[in-house]
Image: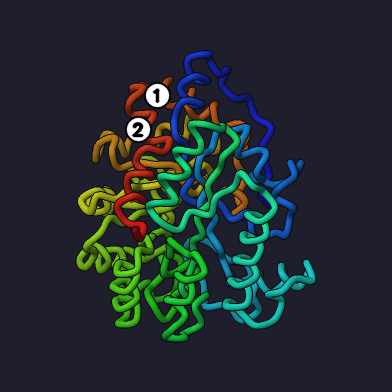
Amino acid sequence: MNRVEHTALPEVSARAVELHHSSAVVDLHADALLFGRDLTRRSSVGHVDLPRLREGGVLLQVFGMATAAPLGMNIDRNEAPGLDMMTLLFCNQLARGCLGGPPARLAAQEARLAALVARDANLIWVRSAGDLERLRSARERDPQMLGAIAGIEGAHALGGDPHALDRAFAEGVRMIGLTHFFDNDYAGSAHGVNKGGLTELGRRTIARMEELGILVDVAHLAPAAIDDVLAIATKPIVQSHGGVKGTCDNARTLSDAHVRGIAATGGVVGIGYWKEAVCGTAPADVARAIHYAVNLVGDEHVALGSDYDGGTTVSFDASQLPVLTQALLDEGLSETSVRRVLGGNALHVLAATLPR
């Protein structure tokens, strides 16, 4: 899992290097907290750790926290898990979260992020619009400054407790996708059995998320559920990681109508780096999907959502991100458009939705 394919990457020009490292780079989704690695140290496995994020010029990383996944999961149809991959993963690590179900695994990953922030004085846990501005100002003075946002991948992590959403907010969660690989009490999953819309609990949860300042993420939602979210959203929403059917038609990607709907909220579509998202792993495959979305809705509504360390295989890790900037230039995007896609658009959405 989480391999980097050893494939030929484009040569990165001086122009691309300068453009990349003078831009604010934001990644809307990585699952690096799952695996118990020491993220303060550069690793030879996986895709993300703090040294590689800094080498790759990243300003802000959203750490998604997945808590349940069926054995043998796929992108087309999954029952709700009985024996669960995440249980096996956390028990194999002898980690907190082995027992206690999704809420315990959410707490374990929140604790890992808190410990990471405590160990690295140049890492800021972004919880508010003020924190975001503080991060941007600090980065101008020190290129080692890095920000982290906590997100939840699947609201089943809240455990059905009516107070759990407010507790998650208090503990620093600022993005939630209602489903992951199976239907739950909140909504249908694109990879579930029924693939239905929002439930009443899902509708109430979205309303409260908007009140609190938690960004609504439609990644992994069934099309009917995305329609329901678009009908009730009053703030920008995002697809944190995925692709577009215009370049890769499968259950993991968005229709043109849904891309337009997300853009109409003022939100962004985060494009991933793995095969099911863009039908390839080369930087050119990612750039092609980004270009398609830019042509569809404009360069203000497209962003990066790697799905690094999410059980994916990619051709470049976080330290090699300038190859993607090169691919975007090669695809014909202007420097202004590239800056927006790399992170400007994501920062705009976060500034509009985070609490003040």
**For the residue marked with disc 2, what is the amino acid?**
His
> Residue at the location (72% across, 72% down)?
88
Q: In this rendering, is residue 68 above or below 311?
A: below
Side of 344 relative to 30 (left or right): left
> Residue at the location (66% across, 79% down)?
83
> Residue at the location (50% across, 30% down)?
324
Where disc 1 sits, the SS reads: loop
| Disc assigned to residue 132 | none
Q: Which residue appears farthest toward the top when viewing the image?
A: 14
Q: Which residue appears farthest toward the bottom when viewing the image?
A: 161
Q: Which residue is mark 2?
A: 291
For the residue pair 62 and 220, the one nearer the viewer reads as 62
Q: Where on the picture, by quarter, is residue 144? A: top right
Q: Where on the picture, by quarter, is residue 57? A: top right
Disc 1 crowd rating (10 Å Cα; few below 14, some 14-19, many 20+) is: some
Disc 2 crowd rating (10 Å Cα; few below 14, some 14-19, many 20+) is: many
**Residue 13 x, y percent position in the rendering:** 53, 14
Is tag 2's residue or tag 1's residue first in the polypeptide sequence? Answer: 2
For the residue pair 279 and 355, the one nearer the viewer reads as 355
> Residue at the location (38% across, 36% down)?
341
Q: In this rendering, is residue 65 above or below 278?
A: below
Give the spatial CA distance, label 2 vs label 1.
7 Å
For the residue pair 323 and 174, the one nearer the viewer reads as 174
Q: Which residue is mark 1?
A: 331
Q: In this rendering, is residue 215 above or below 105?
A: above
Kindly check if marks 2 and 1 are in contact, taking CB atoms under 8 A apart as contact. yes
**Residue 235 x, y percent position in the rendering:** 25, 59
Side of 73 relative to 329 (left or right): right
